[in-house]
Amino acid sequence: MRLFFGSCFTLLLAAVIGLGATWLTLTRGVAFGSLTIGAWTAWPKSGSVDIDPYARATIARTGELPIGTGDGVAFYAHTDDAGNPFDGRCTFVISGMSPAARYWTVTLYDPEGRLIANTIDRHGFTSAEVVRDASGRFAINVGPRARSGNWLPSGGIEKFILVWRLYDTPIGVAMRSTKEGPMPAIVRKGCS
Amino acid sequence: MIRLPLWILGALLLAGIVHLSTVLAMPQAATQDAYSRLAPLTPVNTVVPLAPPTAQAAIMPFMDSAFAVAVCRYDLSSGALKLNAPVSLAYTSVTFYTRNSVAYYAINDRAAGRRAIELDLMTAEQHAEMPEEEGVTAADRLIIESPTTTGLIALRALAPEAGLMAMARRALAGAQCRIEQTQQ
């Protein structure tokens, strides 16, 4: 009798812990070999055959096609440089110089990877269309209210994600250190 | 009660096995992966332009809204595939994915170095069966080996500004992928 209860207990516990761990790792997006520069994190290996099993499983679950190594690299940010999570009711400023890449794009998504509806139909900027100052620096305002200059509307949603994609770039391919930046800085500028 | 730690230890070991096997089985078990999403929209071995992502609907999550995308869903069981993609004015790339969305090869317009990206895609067996002579005469042909018989080719053309999206889509409209007729 004790053996029976013991086996049931063990199997149940194993199923709960095992499946729970799988669920957690896949929804949190666990992957190895990450490259973090400031608030931005990329997984350069996810775009190659060296992709790890966790990233493979995550991609299979979400249904996305990762950007291939040789095409570019995608950096994800969920918070600003100080660690404040991206809240659509706050205004964040992304500023800096263009990273070393032929082209880059920055796109705003909700946590599930969907674009966010807004009146001006803007979901991101490309390196070709962003407005720069005389020294070549740019600043993009991400927030719920219209701003002059580069305004990326966040639609006031609770949580959002920014994805910075560099195309035709040595970052993540040739170099492996965190000194290879600089990636643009992200600073929170108050909440409404 | 002395046995309890042993039962828990057993449970943890078993949990580890359950966890690893479910993670490894996920790519095969997934029903909403990119290939499954695209299969009903794309006939096999044809370049099909994808609808641009909008807030209301997107074929896949995390699509770059600045790019026009076309997909060739391939099946190499009846022969090797020839891909021809004219490059757009800004930036064009071609990425090859296995059936399970692993990107195994990517090339951009500058690396291709011509006005079109031309590639031959085949399985390792088809590559091995290729006549020796042909391999020599076609030295400038780029041959890619696909690890799986089926898979996806994503063609992406950048629209540097929103107004240039039509141009990017037109550039991709000229792309072709087709099965080479094998001579018996």
Image (cartoon, rainbow, N blue to C red):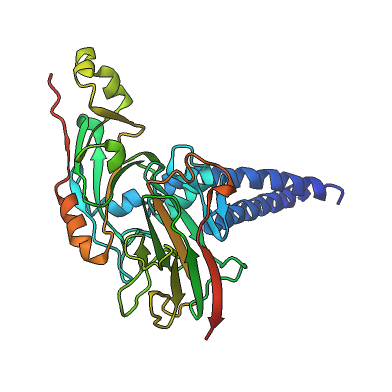
- Residue located 39% across and 82% down the image: A146
In this view, which residue lies farthest toward the bottom? Answer: A192
Q: Is residue A159 visible?
A: no
Please tell me how many numbered marks the rendered image carries: 0
In this view, which residue lies farthest toward the right? Answer: B2
Between A145 and B64, the residue placed more toward the observer is A145
Residue A50 screen position, x and y as percent: 48, 37
Between B78 and B1, the residue placed more toward the observer is B78
A83 versus B149 height, above or below = below
Residue B120 screen position, x and y as percent: 23, 31
- Residue located 30% across and 22% down the image: B125
Residue B60 screen position, x and y as percent: 34, 58
- Residue located 32% across and 48% down the image: B35
- Residue located 52% across and 43% down the image: A53
Q: Is residue A105 visible?
A: yes
Between B57 and B158, the residue placed more toward the observer is B158
- Would residue A15 appear left or right of A75 to someone viewing this image? right
A181 versus B117 height, above or below = below
In this view, which residue lies farthest toward the top? Answer: B133
Q: Quadrant of residue A80?
A: bottom right
- Would residue A179 appear left or right of B98 to someone viewing this image? right
Instruction: Look at the image and tell me in which quarter the C terminus of chain B lies.
Output: top left
B80 versus A72 height, above or below = above
- Would residue A191 appear left or right of B110 to someone viewing this image? right
Between B108 and A109, the residue placed more toward the observer is B108
B162 versus B142 height, above or below = below
Residue A130 screen position, x and y as percent: 36, 66
